[in-house]
Structure formats: C-alpha cells, structure tokens
Image (cartoon, coloured by chain):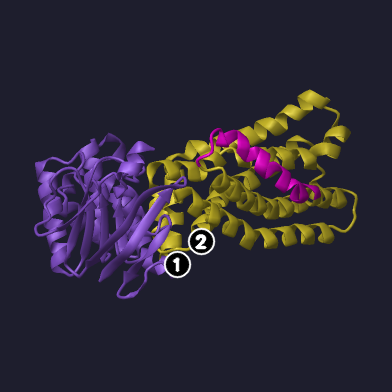
Chain colours: A purple, B yellow
Amino acid sequence: MLEAADLAAERGGRSVFRGVSFTLAPGMALTLTGPNGAGKTTLLRLIAGLGRPSAGRLLWQGEDAFADRAAHARRLSLVGHQDALKPGFTVAEALAHEARIAGVDPAHAGAAMVAFGLAHLADAPIRVLSAGQRRRVALARLPLARRRLWLLDEPTVALDHAGVAALGAVMAAHRAAGGIIIASSHLPLPLPNAAQLRFNIRPEAQAA
Amino acid sequence: MSAFFGMLRRDLALARRNAGDTLAAVAFFLLAAGLFPFGVGPAPELLARIAAGVVWVAALLAALLPLERLIGADYEDGTLDQALLSGLDPAQVAGAKAAAHWLVTGLPLLIASPVAAVMLHLPLAALPVLLAALALGSVVLSLLGTAGAALTLGARRGGVLLPLLVLPLAIPALIFGVAAVDAAAAGLAVRPHLAMLAAIAAVALPLCPIAAGAALRAATE
C-alpha cells in the first residue's frame, strides 16, 4: 500500500506542484498525465527518493517511506528518460550486471530478455541497438529486479506496437502478483483500470 | 553488499572493455616522468635527488585523468540514478567508485612506478619504500579524487575545477610520501612517514565517501 498525502515539490524556489494525494493498494496502477513541465517526472523521482518533497508525506504500509531511503529504494524500480545502459556491453552482459546489482541470480536475465523479445539480441552490443531496442533493455530490468513498486517515466517512448504489447503483458503480470505501478505518459498505456492523476499548470506558474 | 560488489564488478568489466583509458593514464605517467631528464639534464645525481618527487607528482597527475568520467559518465546516462536506487547508502556507492578508480588506475600506476623510478635513477634500496608509500598514497588519491568528481558533477567546466579541488588536498600525502623515500635513500627511519601516510588514508577512508555520497545525493535531486 502506497499512500501520498499532500505532496508538494519545489524547483529552484518555485513550486512545481502541490497537494498531490493518492492511495494505491497492491495491484493498482496510476497514470500521470499533463502538459510538459507540469511535474510528472519530478513526482516520479520524488516518490523514488531522488529529491525531497517540500511538503507532505509518502507512506508505505502506513509508515514514512523516506525514513529509511535505502529500504525504500529496495522496494522500487525506476525507468526514467535515460536508459542507463553502457554502450560497450552486450544485452546479456548488461542485464546480468543489473541482476547482480539488484541481488538477483543473473540466470534470470534470460527470462527478462524473452519477455521483451530481446532473446535474439542477447549477444548484440548495446551500441548497435536502436532507441526502441535500448528502451526494451531498460524495461527488461523491471521483471528482473522484482521490486514491488514500478515507477515508469514515459515508458513507451520509442517502442513499437510489439514492444508496447510486451510491456503491457509484463505490467499485467506484475499487478496480478500484487505490484503497484505509477507511470507517466502522453500516449495511451496498456494499463487497464488505472487511476488517473492529471497535472495542470496552475495559472500563477504560467504567469511567472 | 551484493549491490556494492555488483557495481564494482560492472565498473571493472567496463574498464576491461575500455582498456585504453588505463593504458593512457600509465603512458601519461611514464611520459611525464620521462620528460624530466630532458628538462633538468641527465646528470644521475640530480635525477636521483628528484626521482621520488617526480614519480609522485607524475602519478598524482596521471590519477586525475580518468576522474572526470569516473562518475560523470554515470551521471549523464542515468546509471547514477539507478545506483542510488540500488538500496546502498550514497556513501557506499561513492566507495564502490573509489575502489574502481584504485583498481583501474591506482594499481596500474603503482605497478608502473618502478619503471619510472629506475628511469630516473632512484637508488634501488629506496624502491620498496617508494612502492609502499605510493600504495598508501594512491588509495588517498582515489578517495580524494572520487570526492572531487562527485562535488563537480553537473558543474560547467567540471574537468578544470576538479584538479583545482583535488590537488591541494593531496599535498599532505605528497609531502609524507616523498619524505619517506628521501629518508630511505639517506638511511633514516621511514616508519614515521609511512605511519603518517597511513593515518591520512585512515582519515580519508570514511570521510571522502561520506562527502562524495552527500554530493551524489545533491547532484541527483
């Protein structure tokens, strides 16, 4: 259970958003929509613990999530705008390293590759992959690390239809297993029955 | 701790893939040390007198070369965000980076240092002390360098700022490191100097990763 109570964020002394509240039970998903600059990425990074809220609280199972940031980090995965991949590694090597860092047996990397249709690219260096293929590798971290809370920032950018379908299947399995997903997107996401949080740029922010 | 060793292992694998970076640092080190006979003249007594200082300063400068990319590359491609979300304390993330820098740059420089020392006519009797002092000194440099690299993340012209930040802090290690070798060459006791170097390393070992960790946290907020 993830609960946000009146979260607010500032950037450079200016309010980005405030009064964000939601409650997500296991299996639930939340999509963040709104114009560029409205604070979707800021909110996702803030929930991940990269950044501090200027007001409000984030609760996990009723307890302050940021009291122990390391423990909080161990229950979430963040896929941001950057794929965080080293061009010199092959797909299989990159995922094996990810697995070891996440404390998972690297042998599971194979299943994660299959889930995102990457099996035939296992020995391809990341440097030769297309943007969509890199995104698939970045997303393959999600089923690999097996964290409870997934934070996805525009996860379908650069993905083709098959990639979106693969992500949909992986997200459905995650929710069926009691996982929680928060995703921002300008495109429709394959997240049935997701709650929606709409960001609006407030008039005073627009005037400034 | 699996995340710590996982990160270290990835950095070492990456360094093996980009072995040119290590070779460049070692080549720079030998070349910089090799320039001195041309600059000050090839008189063996003079070279022997300055050998320890030259080896130390050249190693110091060579160790700076990979620092800008040490954390900067991770910062730019998003790997740093993922590292801070691995469940490690930011100071442990910085510690893994410092360990990687020492293994990838400090240790190769240490191994290459006898070559530079012999080139500069350092008395052979002083060579073991030079190695012992550089072993401790390179650890201090990796720790200071990691803190400097973390503090200059995201700064414009961080590559210029970094040496300005790290080099003054390395002066105490340089003084005791060279003094140890000079003492050995003069037949005096070397232990006090090495003990001071060890003390500097013992202070830097907890403080630098903590400072670097705070800087990493600040850079990603």
Dot 1 crowding, Cα within 10 Å, few <14, some 14–19, many 20+:
few
Residue pictured at 51% horizontal, 37% vertical: B21
Q: Nearer the viewer, residue B86 or B42?
A: B86
Could you tell me which chain the residue with mark 2 belongs to?
B
A159 versus A59 height, above or below? above
Q: Which residue is mark 2?
A: B92
Q: Which residue is mark 1?
A: B1
Q: Nearer the viewer, residue A120 or B208?
A: B208
Find the magenta span and give its range. B154-175
Query: How many discs mark residues in the rendered view?
Result: 2
- Please say whether residue A192 is visible from this viewpoint: yes
- Please say whether residue A122 is visible from this viewpoint: no
Q: Residue furthest bottom?
A: A62
Drawn side of residue A157 relative to residue B156, left or right: left
Helix, strand or loop status at disc 2: helix
Q: Quadrant of the N terminus of chain B?
A: bottom left
Picture disc at residue A162: none
Residue pictured at 70% horizontal, 44% vertical: B114
